[in-house]
Amino acid sequence: MAKTLFEKIIDRELPATIVYEDEHCLAFRDINPGAPVHILVIPRKPIPRLCDATADDQTLLGHLMLTANKIAEAEGFGGAYRLVVNNGADAGQSVFHLHLHILAGRPLKWPPG
């Protein structure tokens, strides 16, 4: 199976502006930002969509959310940011490697879509 765009970023085969990494995940600035701060948090483990995660991924999923909070705080937006997960093409997912969008730096309206 071919590597996803995000797997290539993890493997440093494609460039990215990395803002955080640890043994479980990596975070980098989105190249097409939807807000002044738009960072993607991706697990090193390739999970195509959130609905493909299993009970074995519970700790990893929690780690991704806590890491997103840590990154938002480091970026100066710990008290006001949006965290988005698109699950499937009809929900706007374009890279099938689970990722969390951290959006901040401007007022965010509701509903988002």
Image (cartoon, rainbow, N blue to C red):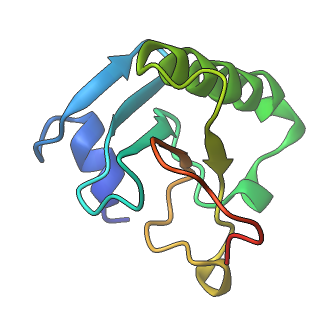
Residue visible at 83% across and 44% down in the picture: 54
Instruction: Please state which of residues 70 and 108 is positioned toward the viewer in this rendering.
Output: 108
Above or below: residue 34 compared with residue 98: below
Residue 10, compared with residue 88, is above or below; it is: above
Left or right: 42, with 81 as reference point: left
Establish if 7 lies above or below 85: above
Front residue of this view, candidates 66 and 4: 66
Q: How many marks?
A: 0
Residue 27 on image: x %, y %: 39, 31
Determine the residue positioned at 76% across, 25% down: 62
Residue 111 is situated, as x and y percent measured from the top left of the image, at 77, 72
For image coordinates 43% across by 66% down, the residue present is 95
On the picture, is 47 further left or further right than 30? right
Q: Quadrant of residue 94?
A: bottom left
- Image location of residue 51, percent across then percent down: 79, 60
State the quadrant of the C terminus: bottom right
Picture coordinates of residue 87, whole percent (x, y): 69, 67
Q: Among all residues in the image, which is located at the extreme right?
A: 55
Question: In which quadrant of the rendered image does the N terminus lie?
Answer: bottom left
Asked whether, in this view, residue 59 is left or right of residue 71, the answer is right
Tell me the quarter of the picture where residue 48 sits.
bottom right
Which residue: 53% across, 16% down?
73
Is 17 situated left or right of 85 in this image?
left
Could you say which is closer to the camera, residue 33 or residue 76?
76
What is the residue that sits farthest to the front in this orientation? 107
